[in-house]
Amino acid sequence: MAQTWFRSPPRRNSGGKVLDMTLQGDFVEAPVTPVAGRVMAVAILVAVLAGALAVAALLLYLALALIPVVVAAGLIAYAAFRWQVWRARRASLGGQRDLFRP
């Protein structure tokens, strides 16, 4: 006996959609992703990429903003080092340079 497929007309409140399934519960045809779903997936991808770009730009801005702080800290460290050398030279032998000292 050949198996017959019966399709009932869609109900009035179902929005005209028909769900084709076998008796085992499998779909007869693979459901097709609607265009709106694809557009939403692309929109989410664009939003994630834009967010990542914004975070990268913010991190670059912060790194560039720290450059003057690093330069100022280096100048202060150099000045403190030169001050210590000047004080040590002044304290040793009355400020005279000893050429024979290693």
Image: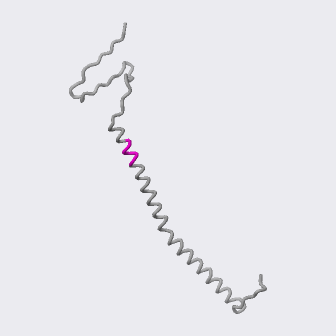
| Quadrant position of residue 11 | top left
Q: Is residue 48 above or below residue 35?
A: below
Q: Which residue is drawn at 54% across and 73% down?
A: 71
* Quadrant (top left/top right/bottom left/bottom right) for the N terminus: top left
Q: Position of residue 87 (x, y in %)?
A: 64, 86
| Quadrant position of residue 4 | top left
Q: Position of residue 31 (x, y in %)?
A: 36, 29
Horizontal side of residue 22 vs 80, given as left or right: left
What kind of colouring is applied to the model shown? one colour
Chief secondary structure of the magenta portion: helix
* Quadrant (top left/top right/bottom left/bottom right) for the C terminus: bottom right
Q: In this view, does 80 lie above or below 21?
A: below
Q: Which residue appears farthest toward the right when viewing the image?
A: 100
Q: In this view, does 52 lie above or below 79?
A: above
Q: Which residue appears farthest toward the left when viewing the image?
A: 12
Q: Does residue 36 belong to the magenta stretch? A: no
Q: Residue at x 37, y 24 (%)?
A: 29
Q: Which residue is drawn at 58% across and 77% down?
A: 77
Q: Residue at x 40, y 52 (%)?
A: 50
* Nearest the eye: 32 or 25: 32
Q: Where is residue 49 in the image (x, y as percent from the top left)?
A: 42, 50
Q: Where is residue 92 in the image (x, y as percent from the top left)?
A: 71, 88
Q: In this view, does 22 lie above or below 89?
A: above
Count how many numbered circles sit on residues in the image. Answer: 0
Question: What segment is highlighted magenta in the picture?
Answer: 41-46
Q: Does residue 43 belong to the magenta stretch? A: yes
Q: Which residue appears farthest toward the bottom when viewing the image?
A: 94
